[in-house]
């Protein structure tokens, strides 16, 4: 084991030299590497190249890293930075990268409203849990076919009949309409959910702005109201996500592989060794793919 570690250390000292240049498009995210500890990572959003990994996601440590390594001119050259819906990153980016536009990853936008819709489904479903036989049937149906309620209505079939447990031979649209008929709140929130979902899918910022500004129906759930306020707060960054092709898909994929490395090694007590192992893995893999 000591021989392997010496090889890793020697390779890291020779090839993994820090750079003081930044690409035009960055992607920020964090991942858990130990109990109660989160690491911060940033990559080139276009190529997926890992630029660096920090042992802490605290703003003071991130600021110190960028101020120390990169000049003001270099930080001003960054055009876009893709993040999740982390308000702390927004303030950090505005200070460190004054000319960069913030892009909210579209996956997190859809996840936000989907979670709100699903929370309401659970509330309605639990209301039927201790009822009579008909209520029990409604409970089982809402529990089993939750995915159909979150699916884009444009993808639901109207004419293709197939067997559904608890329904018999029918279509996707019929199942959804039946579930929505169980409670008015479901119908009202579902309509708003689908409108937001289609606006995001079509990258229609005007429709999204209209939906966020219009008065909300009294049956809109509290979770949905909070989600709407969050979308309003991030509206400018959401507009950037519609204009630019970047997302956090690359960095999320890198995190999945990093977690596998951590699990195979049964964890790393030394973060420096962990960081070097990550860089070597991705550098050697990229080199083999190129050759």
Image (cartoon, grey):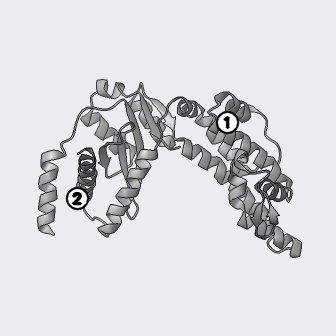
Please tell me whether residue 186 is drawn above or below residue 129 in the rendered image. above
Disc marking residue 114: none
Is 107 left or right of 227, judged from the image as shown?
Answer: left
Asked which secondary structure carries label 2, the reply is helix
Is 73 left or right of 173, judged from the image as shown?
Answer: left
Q: Determine the residue positioned at 70% across, 31% down.
A: 207
Q: Is residue 180 in sight in this rendering?
A: yes
Is 57 left or right of 167, judged from the image as shown?
Answer: left
Is label 2 in contact with label 1 (beta carbons under 8 Å)? no
Is 127 left or right of 65, judged from the image as shown?
Answer: right
Name the quadrant of the C terminus: top left
Please tell me whether residue 75 is drawn above or below residue 138 in the rendered image. above
* Residue 33 spot, x, y in % from top left: 36, 60
Considering depth in this image, is 158 or 236 the residue closer to the camera? 158
Considering depth in this image, is 137 or 2 the residue closer to the camera? 137
Q: Is residue 126 in sight in this rendering?
A: no
* Residue 79 spot, x, y in % from top left: 41, 27
Task: Indicate which disc, 2 or 1, sits on the residue closer to the N terminus.
Answer: 1
Within 10 Å of disc 2 (Cα), the crowding (few <14, some 14-19, many 20+) is: some
Residues under labels 2 and 1: Cα distance? 45 Å
* Residue 229 spot, x, y in % from top left: 66, 40
Asked which secondary structure carries label 1, the reply is helix
Quadrant hosting residue 51: top left
Q: Which residue is mark 2?
A: 273
Quadrant hosting residue 212: top right
Considering depth in this image, is 10 or 89 the residue closer to the camera? 10
Q: Which residue is mark 1?
A: 199
* Residue 102 spot, x, y in % from top left: 48, 33
């Amino acid at each position: 084991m000591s021989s392997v570690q010496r090889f890793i250390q020697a390779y890291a000292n020779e090839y993994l030299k820090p750079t003081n240049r930044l690409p035009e498009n960055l992607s920020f995210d964090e991942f858990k590497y130990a109990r109660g500890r989160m690491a911060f990572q940033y990559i080139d959003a276009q190529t997926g190249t890992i630029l660096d990994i920090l042992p802490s996601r605290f703003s003071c440590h991130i600021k110190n890293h960028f101020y120390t390594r990169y000049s003001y001119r270099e930080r001003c050259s960054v055009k876009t930075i893709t993040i999740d819906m982390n308000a702390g990153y927004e303030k950090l980016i505005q200070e460190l990268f004054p000319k960069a536009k913030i892009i909210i990853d579209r996956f997190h936008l859809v996840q936000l409203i989907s979670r709100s819709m699903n929370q309401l489904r659970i509330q309605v479903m639990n209301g039927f849990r201790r009822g009579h036989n008909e209520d029990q049937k409604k409970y089982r149906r809402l529990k089993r076919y939750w995915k159909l309620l979150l699916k884009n209505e444009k993808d639901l079939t109207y004419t293709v009949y197939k067997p559904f447990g608890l329904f018999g031979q029918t279509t996707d649209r019929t199942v959804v309409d039946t579930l929505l008929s169980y409670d008015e709140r479901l119908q009202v929130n579902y309509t708003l959910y689908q409108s937001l979902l289609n606006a995001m899918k079509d990258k229609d910022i005007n429709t999204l702005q209209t939906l966020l500004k219009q008065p909300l129906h009294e049956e809109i759930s509290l979770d949905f109201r909070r989600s709407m306020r969050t979308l309003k707060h991030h509206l400018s960054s959401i507009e950037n996500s519609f204009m630019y092709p970047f997302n956090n898909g690359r960095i999320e994929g890198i995190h999945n592989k990093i977690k596998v490395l951590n699990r195979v090694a049964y964890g790393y007590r030394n973060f420096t060794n962990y960081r070097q192992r990550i860089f070597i893995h991705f550098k050697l893999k990229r080199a083999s793919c190129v050759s």
